[in-house]
Image (cartoon, rainbow, N blue to C red):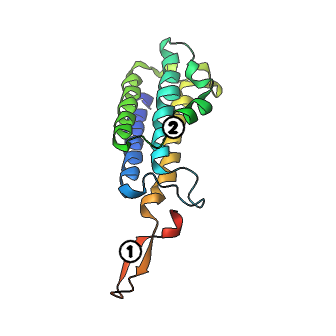
Amino acid sequence: MDLSRWFSEQLKSSADGFAWAVEQIPADRRFVTPSTLLGEWNAARHVFHMLYYEQAVALPSMGQWLGKPYPSTVNNFDEDEDAAWGNDHDLEPMLADFREIRAEQIALLPNFDAQTWNETRNTVWGKQTLKWVVTKTFQHTAEHTHDVLPYGFVLGYVCTASTREWRIEPYPFLFC
């Protein structure tokens, strides 16, 4: 199996899937914290996290197999990310930046041969192979896609009192 080509397809489609899931959320709910039934982060916070992770961990970690040093950006990742977060972020530029940083990762993939994929390095997750590190990025994207997807599709039937017509709307108790 050509892992460079396979991961190129997976990283591209998973990034597209994540962005698509976010874009399905009505604009007025993207910064609204959902009920604890859906998690503790709003959609914009998920996008910010994915962008921050890709910039500070995923891309620099892949660079280790190209001779770059261990990324210092991972030392205080959670604290640094929390300090950088604020509700004044614009979602569209964050999604565009996420896609751009993901494209940079995909552009690195052809540099790795079959042997390199199985070489280990010290990583933020301990001693791991490049294959494991890129798989982690793929998994991480799937996890956050899973988290935000319900935000756009948590629907229920609501009866309008004035017209007595039923329509599909988000369950209001999930977004308070």
Decide: few, some or many residues near mark 2? Use Cα within 10 Å; few <14, some 14-19, many ≥20. some
In x, y percent, where is residue 57?
Answer: 53, 27
Instruction: Give the mark nearer the N terminus: 2 vs 1.
Output: 2
Q: Are marks 2 and 1 in contact (CB under 8 Å)?
A: no
- Residue under label 1: 168
**Mark 1 Cα within 10 Å, few/some/many (few <14, many 20+)?**
few
Query: In the rendered view of the protein, which quadrant contains the N terminus?
Result: top left
Residue in view at x 52 percent, y 33 percent: 84
Whether residue 63 appears in this view of the structure is yes
Quarter of the figure with residue 38: bottom right
Residue tagged 2: 85
Q: In the image, residue 132 lies at what x, y percent?
A: 57, 31
Residue at 38% across, 46% down: 19
Kindly state the secondary structure of the residue where label 2 is placed.
loop
Q: Residues under labels 2 and 1: Cα distance?
A: 33 Å
Q: Amino acid at mark 1?
A: Ile
